[in-house]
Amino acid sequence: VCAKLAFVNLCLRCCIGFEMGPVLGRLSNRASDSEPFAGLDDASVEGGLGGFSVTTIRKGTSQRKPTTGEVVVCHYVGRLNDGTIFDSSRARNKPLNFVIGIGSVIKGWDEGVAQMELGERACIVAPPEYGYGEDGGGMVPGGSTLIFDVELLKIGNEQASAGCVVS
């Protein structure tokens, strides 16, 4: 239970800035108000919870999910495990368009966004094999686990634009 709550705290803290430290501190002597992950090593947080995951922050407005080949439009904030933001469509006020399921984005996005419902906001945790691997890329160091706050805004081929990512 404590490991699952620690994971939820990781998503909430990194994706939306909410801190569950006081709750975790009451449930485990390994956690404290100031360091909710004290006593949890990286393997416990990542490997013990399955590595790749999609956790709903806010339910979708419909049950519609994207299928391979459809264009999706998403807002996102990408953070490293230490909380450093490495990319944000919200900061640019320009959502990302991409074709789902064809490998035009990292595996964590292709598989994670495909699980989301239209209007849903979720925390996608992508270990290196679902992100930029051992080599990294741009501001992302090699071997990084990535944490994304993703909101699925639109689904459908009619949403394609000049900024659409394709492979």
Image (cartoon, rainbow, N blue to C red):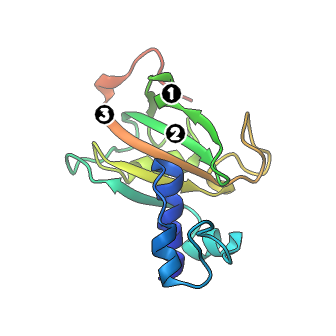
Q: Is residue 104 left or right of residue 96?
A: right
Dot label at residue 154? 3
Cα–Cα gap, marks 2 and 1 = 8 Å
Disc 2 residue type (three-letter): Val
Residue designated by label 2: 77
Question: How dense is the environment of label 2, judged by Cα within 10 Å: few (below 14), some, or many (20 and up)?
Answer: many
Q: Position of residue 97 (x, y in %)?
A: 44, 28
Q: Quadrant of residue 85?
A: top right
User: Which residue is drawn at the image coordinates 48% and 83% (left, top)?
Assistant: 27
User: Which residue is drawn at the image coordinates 66% and 75% (left, top)?
Assistant: 40
Marks 3,1: beta carbons within 8 A:
no
Q: Residue 149 or 166: which is nearer the viewer?
A: 149
Q: Position of residue 137 (x, y in %)?
A: 74, 38
The relative height of residue 155 versus residue 114 in the rendered view (above or below) is above
Q: Quadrant of the C terminus?
A: top right
Q: Residue 164 or 23: which is nearer the viewer?
A: 23
The relative height of residue 4 versus residue 90 in the rendered view (above or below) is below
User: Which residue is drawn at the image coordinates 27% and 53% (left, top)?
Assistant: 59
The relative height of residue 78 versus residue 128 in the rendered view (above or below) is above
Disc 1 residue type (three-letter): Ala
